Amino acid sequence: MDKARLLIIVALLGGAGAGAACNRTPADEQRQAMEAQNEANRDIHEANREANERTAEIRQDTNEKAAEIRKDYDKTVAEGNEKIQEAQKDAREESAEAQASANERIREANRDVVASDDSLRTWGQERIDGLNDKIDEARVKAEKADPKARAQFEAGMKDVQAKRDALVTEFAAADTKNEVAVDKFKGRVEAEIDRLEDRVEKLEGRL
């Protein structure tokens, strides 16, 4: 094949390719662009779906770990509060027992200073001591009760203690020389202390 014929063939082939390109219409171009966009949309949708799934997994994992932390925290706080309440309860019980012991020593000291021939005050001291013992025992028990019951007990005990203190004051000023007056005084005090002891027993029974 000579050089001239080769050039003619190449020219013809080139012209055919150009003609094919020139034969593409605007609709073809638009369709190709839409296909490219659709493919891009599919890729974007898939990427968003994968991202959403991964986000949901991370969020679920985070929530589960946070729930575990909150559970441990709440448990720790509850255990701490329980220990605090137990310690406070023990302290109240020990304080009540210590006060009861101190009261007994004080009463013993008071008995020592009462004259041996003062039968009224000796009798009165013994009766007051008996009432105080009941008060102390009830108060020790009250420290083991729940706060509401303990508060009601203490409210009732205020009146008992006020009347007991009034009796102690009366004994200090009592006339020990007049036998008639002594007997009358003892009768009234006996009845009052019996009422107070009964009141303490009722308050203690409600704990």
Image (spheres, rainbow, N blue to C red):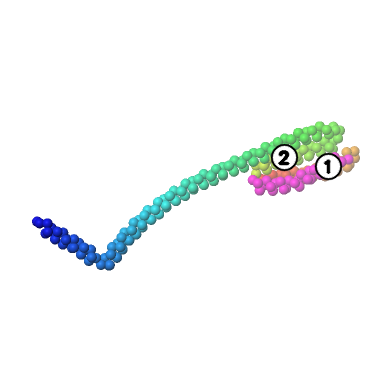
The boundaries of the magenta stretch are 146-175
Question: Distance between the Cα atoms at labels 1 and 2?
Answer: 20 Å
The image shows residue 17 at horizontal and vertical percentages of: 20, 61
Q: Secondary structure at mark 2?
A: helix
The image shows residue 113 at horizontal and vertical percentages of: 83, 33
Q: Please state, as top left, top right, bottom left or bottom right, where the C terminus lies in the image.
A: top right
Decide: is 114 above or below 61.
Answer: above
Q: Amino acid at mark 2?
A: Asp
Residue for point 71% across, 46% down: 154
Q: Is residue 186 visible?
A: no
Q: Amino acid at mark 1?
A: Thr
Residue for point 23% across, 65% down: 22
| Label disc, if present, on residue 169 of the rendered structure | 1
The image shows residue 128 at horizontal and vertical percentages of: 78, 39
**Magenta stretch: residue 172 in it?**
yes
Residue 9 versus residue 181: which sits nearer the camera? 9
Q: Quadrant of residue 47?
A: bottom left
Relative side of 83 to 41, left or right: right
Q: Earlier in the sequence, mark 1 or mark 2?
A: 2
Decide: is 68 above or below 101.
Answer: below
Q: Quadrant of residue 116?
A: top right
**Magenta stretch: residue 83 in it?**
no
Q: Which residue is the site of mark 2?
A: 136
The image shows residue 14 at horizontal and vertical percentages of: 18, 61
The majority secondary structure of the magenta stretch comes to helix
> Badge 2: few (under 14), some or many (20 or more) residues near its Cα, within 10 Å?
some
| Label disc, if present, on residue 111 of the rendered structure | none
The single residue placed furthest to the left in the displayed view is 1
> Badge 1: few (under 14), some or many (20 or more) residues near its Cα, within 10 Å?
few
How many numbered discs?
2
